[in-house]
Every structure is written in C-alpha cells, then in structure tokens.
Amino acid sequence: MSAEYRVDLDAFRRNLRRVREAVAPAAHMLVVKDDAYAHGLETLVRRAWDEGVRWFGAFDVATGAAVRAITGPDARIFVWLIGGVDDLRAGIAADLDLGIGDEALLDDLAGSPAASARVHLKVDTGLHRNGIRPERWDAALARTAELVDQGRAVLEGIWSHISEASDADDDDARALFLSARDAARAAGLEPRFSHLAASAAGFARGEFREDLVRVGAFSYGIRPAGGPGEVELGIEPIAALVATVIAVDPAGVHLDVGSLHGLPSALSGRFDVITPAGPRRVEAIGATSTALAPWDDARVGDEITVFGRGALRSATDLAELIDTIGEEIALRVSPSIPRVYAG
C-alpha cells in the first residue's frame, strides 16, 4: 500500500498554542486517547511535551503507562477508564492521576499497595458517562476521607463531563459540579484541581474552565459537528489521508483505500476530492479501493488527498454527511496506513 496518513507537526504546534491561549488561565490537558486520535501516540506526545504541555488525558491505564514511558516522571497523566483492582495497582505503579467515578473503586483502593493514589473524584452531572450520583456523593466523600486518613489516597481533583447539548443543560451541570466541590470542602477535603470543560465549552465558556481543560479534538484540528468552523475557532486540521491511483479503467479512477482502511462506505457518492483535472466525485467505496469519477490523462501513481489538511473536505465535513462526529472519521483511519510526519 502506498496510501499515507500525513501529519503536519507544525500545524499541531500551532493548534496547541491556540488551545493554550483559548483556555488560559486554566492549563491544557491534552487528551491522547485512541493513539492520539489515530495520529500516533509517541510522536504526538513527544511534540506536545516539547511545546510545553504538562498534563495528558490518556483515558485508560495502559495508554497512561505508555505516556509515562514517553514523557518520563514529570508529566501529569490523568486516566478515567479503570476496570478494577488490577488497573488501580497498575495506575498507581505508573504514577498516574486516577479518575474515580464508581464507589466500588474506592473500596478497591483500600486493598491497594501502600503507595498513595492520586484521586480525582467524579460527580455525575447529568451526562451519565459514569460518575458518582449526587445522592451518593456525601457517602463517597466520607469513604474518600477515610482513605486519605489511612494514607491510601490523596484527593487531587473534582471533575465531571458535560453534555454540551445546550447552554441551559450545561449550566445545570455546572451548578451540580460546584455544589459537589463545596460539599468536598465542607467534608474537610480540599482538591487541588477542578476540571469540567472539554474542547467546546473550554473555548466558548470561560466560567467552565476551572483549573484544567481537557482538550483533544480541537488540538488535532477536528472541529465539532454542527458547530463553529476551523477558521472561527482558530485551529487547523493537522492530518491528511493521501491515497494513490492504482488503476484507471472505463469505470473510473481507483484509489488504494477503502472501507477496510477506515473510509466509511456510507460516504459513497456523497463528496468530491481534488484531482489533477479538478474536483471529482467519490462514486464507490469498496472494501480495499475507492472509485472516483474518471478524467482524461489520469495516471497510476497520481496522489489524491481524500480528506483532511489540503483537501476539499475535513474529517468533520465527512462526518456531517453521515450524522456522526469528526473524531469518529479520524479514528477509523486504519493502523495499516503508515503515519508520515513533517514539521
């Protein structure tokens, strides 16, 4: 295969600086889940560290441990998908910040190694993407206080997710969040960090920024579906899926990427790409190849940018055609397609 997923690290640097400016004075926690949104974990984490990022959101413990191996001891690495005792022990061993959104995990901590866990306690503010229910919050605080007294935990943070479905819903979620933090302080627990906002709220609503803002998609230049554009946000796509013409026949011009490489077949007939002869429609997306509308003088070996940086369509543009979100298009790019870095 000669197709490539080309990542511009200078564009990534510019996005990181834009995010830092947008969320200040809060710190940017760069979310690097799913292989840094399929851009390549090691290269992106190294560049982010060089650019001054000191907080990473790694989602799961295995990714967090990989980030620790890349950055060394000084990074703060937050994970929030924790499967039980083994994950807790691995997270503590890797010196990770642990997002706890299940009371059972607090009980599991009682049997953890002697090393103290850095805990960020999550309250469910209505998204129901895990988190401790408000009616159980006081009990969770009491259990956390016991663990702190026993030296098993340090309460580093209070956090939550919000839906970003409407300002009114998010305002209600924030009120619950602030109440939960006040309750923690009333219980004698003083978290060092609060974090509630992700990309969209972090950019648009200053009162949601708190101490940390978890920004993933915007850092990679992936704008929200149905939201403001890249120019308005001041970000730019950092990657492009570049395919190669492998055959030309009366049925069309055929590229070396298909649905097995991550290009959704539902996009067949729904978007154009730039060719040496101008825009041409993507007519059919098969398992391992894609057919474009033909043009004169098409040649095997011609390169075609399918989506992303320099293309007619971004990942989010394609996502909106099939009612999904831009990061889902980016995450589908197969690891069988080489990542090539510049900048």
Image (spheres, rainbow, N blue to C red):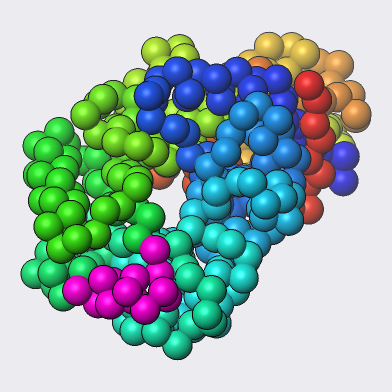
Occupied quadrant, residue 287: bottom right
Judge from the rendering whether residue 134 lies leftward or rightward of residue 198; answer left or right: left
Q: Main secondary structure of the magenta part?
A: helix
Residue 196 sits inside the magenta stretch: no
- Looking at the rendering, the stretch of residues picked out in magenta corresponds to 142-154
Q: Can see residue 57?
A: yes
Occupied quadrant, residue 16: top right
Residue 230 position within the rendered picture, expressed as x and y whole percent measured from the top left = 46, 18
In which quadrant is the C terminus drawn? top right
Residue 270 position within the rendered picture, expressed as x and y whole percent measured from the top left = 50, 33
In-front residue for pair 184/62? 184
Whether 127 is drawn above or below 165: the answer is below
Judge from the rendering whether residue 327 lies leftward or rightward of residue 133; answer left or right: right
Judge from the rendering whether residue 304 lies leftward or rightward of residue 201; answer left or right: right
Residue under the image location 65 percent in, 62 percent down:
65
Residue 185 position within the rendered picture, expressed as x and y whole percent measured from the top left = 18, 54
Q: How many marks?
A: 0
Residue 310 position within the rendered picture, expressed as x and y whole percent measured from the top left = 66, 18
Residue under the image location 70 percent in, 47 percent down:
71
Residue under the image location 59 percent in, 53 percent down:
34
Residue under the image location 86 percent in, 16 percent down:
297
In-front residue for pair 13/78? 78
Occupied quadrant, residue 342: top right
